[in-house]
Amino acid sequence: MMPKLLAITTLLALAVGVIAQVKAPPVELRESPFFEGEIVIETRDGPRTLKIELKQYQLDGHARIALDLPSSGMVVFQHRAGEVELSAGKTEFEPLEGEWMTIDLPEQLMLSTEDDAALIDVILVSE
């Protein structure tokens, strides 16, 4: 009886060790660009060219990722789905689904999720 118990205990210990070594999948931020182009607007100081980008970001659950954004301009976010926290500098937002946010650049922007994936629409306007 004792050798069987020892064998079962050993197998359980090995199984727990193998399970503990399984690595979590890498956190992913998928970017889907929809449009990129330039527009020219007339200002008091003459014509000004702006770059416009429309993108959608999908962020896996259990993630914290910095977005790579232009150094000037503005970004408009629409929270489409999932639970997400957006940090811009020292300010943190927990937007509701469908809510819009506008942030002036440059700013360090972070997206964070808990156990839910998130979907964000982004409009970037830069010079």
Image (cartoon, helix red, strand yellow):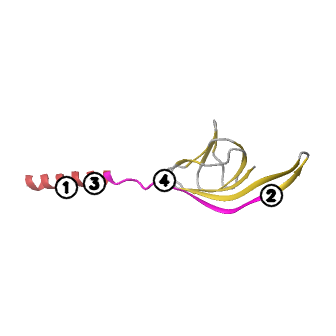
Q: Secondary structure at mark 2?
A: strand
Mark 4 crowdedness (10 Å alpha carbons): few <14, some 14-19, many ≥20:
few
Q: Split into 4 quadrants, where in the image is the N terminus?
A: bottom left
- Could you tell me residue 49's position as x and y percent? 80, 53
Residue at 26% in and 51% down: 17
CA separation in Å, label 4 and label 3: 22 Å
Tell me the magenta residue range: 21-38
Amino acid type at image mark 2: Ile
- Counting residues from the start of the chain, the first of labels 1 and 2 encountered is 1
**Residues marked 2 and 4 touching at CB (< 8 Å):** no
**Residue farthest along the front direction in this orientation:** 46
The residue under label 4 is: 27
Residue at 65% in and 48% down: 69
Residue at 64% in and 38% down: 89
Amino acid type at image mark 4: Val
Query: Taking 73 as reference, is 62 left or right?
Result: left
Amino acid type at image mark 3: Val
Residue depth check, mark 1 versus mark 2: number of the one nearer the observer: 2
Q: Secondary structure at mark 3?
A: helix
- Counting residues from the start of the chain, the first of labels 4 and 1 encountered is 1
**Residues marked 4 and 1 touching at CB (< 8 Å):** no
- Could you tell me residue 6's position as x and y percent? 13, 52
- Counting residues from the start of the chain, the first of labels 1 and 3 encountered is 1
**Rendered image: mark on residue 18:** 3
